[in-house]
Every structure is written in C-alpha cells, then in structure tokens.
Amino acid sequence: MSDYEAFRARARTWLQSVAGEFGREARRGLDVEQDLALGRRYLAARFDAGFAGINWPTEMGGQGLTHIEKVIFDTEEMGFGMPTAYFGISLGMPVPILMRFCEDKAFVKERVLKALRGEEIWCQLFSEPAGGSDLAGLRTRAEVDGNGWKLNGQKVWTSWAQYCDYGVIVARTDPTVPKHKGLTYYWVDMKAPGVEVRPIKLAGGDSHVNEVFFDDVRLEDSQRMSPVGGGFAVAMATLMIERYVATDSGGFGPHLDLFVDLARDVEINGRPAIEDGRVRSQIARNHAMRAGLESITTRAMLMMQAGMEPGPEGSLNKLVAVRSRQKLSELAIDLQGNAGLAFDPHASQKENWTASWLNAPTGRIAGGADEMLLNTIAERILGLPQDHRPDKGVPFNQIPA
Ligand SMILES: Cc1cc2nc3c(=O)[nH]c(=O)nc-3n(C[C@H](O)[C@H](O)[C@H](O)COP(=O)(O)OP(=O)(O)OC[C@H]3O[C@@H](n4cnc5c(N)ncnc54)[C@H](O)[C@@H]3O)c2cc1C
C-alpha cells in the first residue's frame, strides 16, 4: 500500500469512528447555533486526532504533510456531512494568507492554533456595494491616523461575519492613483469599537451572509499585511487560493452517492429510477465531471508542491461544479414528484436536494460570478482578446461613479 493509500485508510477509519458524534445523523434538526457549536467540537477533535492543518507547517500546529494528503482527507471527509461549513472560508483563505503575509509571527501562531481548533473564525471582507466582480473599484477607505489607520466604509455579502472574531480586509488608501494601485490589505478585529454586522436573509431562509459597517475603526500599523498601495497583489493571492477552495467537486451540494441512493428509492413508470437510461447517464456524466475536477485540483496541488503557481484552470472548478449541482438538484426534485417541493428551513444544501437547488444560484455568484470565470477562461486559457476596460490607468477619483 502506498503512503497515500495508507493515509486515506487512516483518515477513513478515524472519520468513521466519529461520524456518529458529528456527522449527518448527529446534525439532523439542529439550529445554526447548535450546529456551529458541534462544528467547533468537531474541529477540536480533528485537531487532537492529527488531521488539522494537514499541509500546514508543524511549527504552526499543522501536520507538515503535502497538498495531496490534504485533498485525500477533504475528499474522504466530504462523504460524512461533518459541520465544517462555518470554518471553510476562515481556514481556506484568511488564515493561510495571515501565515504568509503577517509579520507578527507570535500573533499569527496563536491565531492559527485557535482557528484550527475552531475556537476562532476569520472572514474575508472584500466585496462592497460598488466593488464585487470589480474588486479594485471598492470604496471603503483607510486613512492615516497618528501612527495607525482609521477605517470607514461598508462591506457586503461577508460570509459568517456574525460569528467571526477577525477578518482580512482590503481598503482604499489613495484615491488619486489608478484603482488597482491605491489599495492596502489589513487584518481587522471584528469585535473592535465601530464594527457593526447586520445579517442578510437569503431565499432559503438562512442568514449566513452579512453587511459589515466600519465607523472610525482604529487599525494599528502592525495590522497592515501589504505595502501601502500594494494590497491588490495580496488580494489576488487570496483569490488564487479561493479558485481551489471556493467549492468541492460537488459544487458544495450533495454527494453523488446521495443521488444514487435517491435513484434506487424512487420509481419511474413502476421501475426503480436507477434502471432508467437517462438517470444512469446523468450519474455517469456527473461522476466523470467530478473526477475531472478532482484531477485538476490534484494537478494544482502537485504544482504548488513543486513550488509553482497553479494556472487559471482553477476557474473551471466552480463554474462547472456549481452549474452541474444545480442541474442535478433539479433532476432530483423532479424524480421525487410532489415530495421534492417540500421545504425544510433547517435542511442542509449538502444533503437535501430542494435546499441545494434553492441555494445553487448564490454559489454561482459567490467567490466570482460565472461570467467573470468565463472571462478568465476566455482570456487566460483560450487566449481571446481582453474584456473592454475603460477605466484602465485612470486615477480612481476621476472614474465617473
Ligand atoms: C452566498 C454568497 C457569499 C459570499 N461571501 C463573500 C465573502 O465572504 N466575502 C466577500 O468579500 N464577498 C462575498 N460574496 C460576494 C461575491 O464575491 C460577489 O457577490 C461577487 O464577486 C459578485 O459581485 P457583485 O455581487 O457586486 O455583482 P456585480 O459585480 O455587480 O455583478 C453583477 C452581474 O454582472 C456580471 N458582470 C460584472 N462584471 C462583468 C464583466 N466584466 N463581464 C461580464 N459580466 C460581468 C456578473 O457576472 C453578475 O452576473 C458572497 C456572495 C454570495 C452570493
């Protein structure tokens, strides 16, 4: 057995041993606060079992293993329905970026350990009412204030902000230069005076996204994680990671095994749906597609392992996975007939086809809208001409708003 297969077997054995305590069945009927509390206990157990921060340095509390072991663990974990969603962004982007770009290493180490154990959560404060796809168009400003900074403005769609302790944020520090050049990157204490979080209710009934307001929030200069005016490069480094962690091959919807189970349970014309050629071909298509996306991710991980930056092909991941999840969820609803329309506000989008379908459109926007991913594929993979950019090189304060 290869080392990787031995690792997979060890991970699976541990996951099976705790599935009853933290997995799908244990979570049924819990409200968000209870599920989050269970999630924190799961992360602590995962840390103690030696499966946290798999590809992170041991001096930061990680396991010092490779990106491949990380993908193996994530793929195995995905099938158990563990309560990890609250920590996905935190451990996916902000905390790795903190490890890479924050110079106060003692602070970083303490934060990383607490984040790995689920004791602290980080959010990503990028999008604004006028700065989503066009991130560099953001208007939240940080102004010099003595030896630190003063932050004013508004972010929107910030996932899990109401449960977060810290966030990473991009703000405009110089409006007189072209938009990409006047941005600076910081970390911010979400409990600091002047930070206000207002949850937004989504169509599925949940409120995991928020508006966040900053009113004269004090930032120390030690909270700065980029050169002044050099924040866009750190934001891009964050988004490069996001291309690989913003989704799994199931588009953050139900595992394909759950569709197979459903197709065995329901009937078409008096026969199990699994015997229907159209249903079988959808299962085969989705299996092939998911395997293809997992290969792209594995290849990217191997590149990172070899010290290279993965290419723009990461843009395919979310585009293909979430679109496919939406179509598969629609088929699953159809197969269930009237029962497919029953709405359970507590149902998880990773287990319930109706919740998955209702929630899928947000997945096609979050972390880069479909059209933006198509632009990247057109320009960076297919080599087509660039999108029209009329504000290129124009000082930010001279762009008509
Ligand atoms: C569930 C959810 C969670 C999110 N979580 C976070 C978070 O934690 N942190 C965070 O910072 N943000 C988060 N976001 C915000 C998300 O990143 C933005 O919504 C997204 O980048 C799109 O920006 P926008 O909403 O401003 O839409 P816009 O940029 O205004 O886009 C509107 C429409 O125009 C299209 N469009 C825009 N520009 C172009 C172009 N050049 N070419 C072609 N079409 C174009 C878009 O594709 C889209 O269809 C989240 C969003 C959602 C829905």
Image: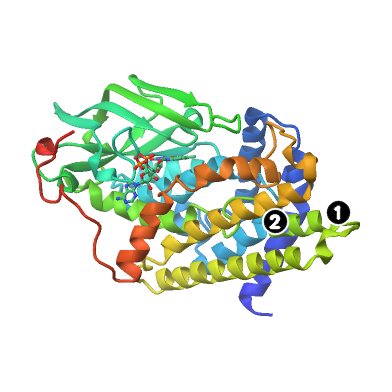
Q: How crowded is the residue under tag 2: few (<14 C-alpha within 10 Å), some, or many (20+)?
A: some
**Residue 66 visible at all:** no
Q: Does the numbered disc 1 mark a residue whose Cβ is under 8 Å from ligand 1?
A: no
Q: Nearer the viewer, residue 322 or 40?
A: 322
Q: Does the numbered disc 2 mark a residue whose Cβ is under 8 Å from ligand 1?
A: no
Q: Nearer the viewer, mark 2 or mark 1?
A: 1
For this orientation, the residue located farthest to the right is: 270
Q: Residue at x 68, y 72 (%)?
A: 6
Q: Residue at x 21, y 36 (%)?
A: 221
Q: Is residue 90 left or right of residue 350?
A: left
Vertical arrangement, residue 194 with respect to residue 305, above or below: above
Q: Position of residue 360 (x, y in %)?
A: 56, 45
User: On the image, numbered disc 1 is attached to which residue?
Assistant: 265
Q: Nearer the viewer, residue 53 or 401?
A: 401
The image shows a total of numbered marks equal to 2
Measure how far apart labels 2 and 1 are at the Cα level.
19 Å
Ligand 1 resides in the quarter of the picture at top left
Label 2 secondary element: loop
**Residue 157 visible at all:** yes
Please name the amino acid that badge 2 sits on: Gly
User: On the image, numbered disc 2 is attached to which residue?
Assistant: 79
